Amino acid sequence: MQRLRVLNLGLNEEITFDSFGGISEDILLSHIEGLGHPGATSQKSQGVVQDGCDAEDALLDNRVIKLSATIRTKDRERLYQLRRRIFRIINPKTYNSKTGKRGELLLYYTNNYKTYRIYARVEDSFDFKERIKNHDKTIISFLCTNPYLLDENDTLTDIKSSKGGIVFPLALPSTFSQVAFYKEVNNEGDTDTPLSIIFNGPAINPCITNETTGEYIKVNREIGEREKIVINTESGKETVTLVTPNGTENVYNNIDLNSTFFDLIVGKNLLRYSSDSEITKDTVSVEFANRYTGA
């Protein structure tokens, strides 16, 4: 079983291509490709008098998913109605007011094992050119500039919640004691993945540390009881946002200078939350999606 659900993020409308046909009519997923490894470009370096080279890294290429689809109906009018719906939803000109971009799609691919999601847009124009009676066929190419397949839904994990957690008081060389909360988070994907960190106040200088790698990110400021700070660690898209009842504010400059916008490494990550206050109302959670190189 295979299924591809295409959501137009500008229209908030969707259409589904299914490998299982219905009794009277359907939009059939005849064939799909481009869900394996997308290809990679090796990063190499070579010294002046060095024989051969050193392999430094590999960068994944864009992913292109190609869909062969067939419309099957008993009625000619219905055939053209479904064609019109496909052209409307898989549309490079649809405007997404939230991002200011055009043609943004979200694909949900399902097989017998699980469902993945990936962001895409239409790579080339497409048409229906093989109509036989009330059946019509087309091939659609989706360009995925971020090649990773993601879980169907993000994973949201509380490091400290109002329901409590595992607490380890730490004796520090100061006049107060600091309470730390630990949580083991498992990255089940094929590569490191960024995360979103949500500090909910009240808190003073909240900090989250990945004890597995030694990296941490700390915000040097006080957060009020009705405020929160949201941090995005994705490379090239790092943000630190204060959310209050009156709006949002960029507080990137409040990040501790030695902080790292770290990723979760593959496997187990031991995360520790701490702050310079003993208030019990503060909470912190992390949100992420496992990244897969193929389905």
Image (cartoon, rainbow, N blue to C red):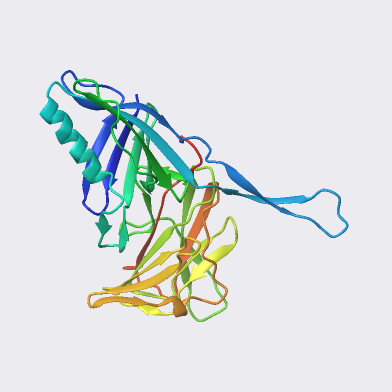
Of the pair 7 and 150, the residue shown nearer to us:
7
Residue projecting furthest to the right: 49
As drawn, is 197 to the left or to the right of 209? Answer: left
> Eyeballing the image, is 189 above or below 264?
above
Residue 60 picture location, percent across and down: 56, 47
As drawn, is 236 to the left or to the right of 66? Answer: right
Of the pair 214 and 76, the residue shown nearer to us:
76
Residue 275 picture location, percent across and down: 44, 72
Q: Residue at x 28, y 44 (%)?
A: 90
Of the pair 46 and 129, the residue shown nearer to us:
129
> Eyeballing the image, is 65 above or below 238?
above
* Picture quadrant where residue 174 is located: bottom right
Q: Residue at x 42, y 38 (%)?
A: 65
* Picture quadrant where residue 137 is located: top left
Q: Residue at x 28, y 54 (%)?
A: 93
Residue projecting furthest to the top: 23
As drawn, is 172 to the left or to the right of 281? Answer: right
Of the pair 61 and 135, the residue shown nearer to us:
135
Residue 282 picture location, percent across and down: 34, 68
Q: Quadrant of the N terminus?
A: top left
Q: How many marks?
A: 0
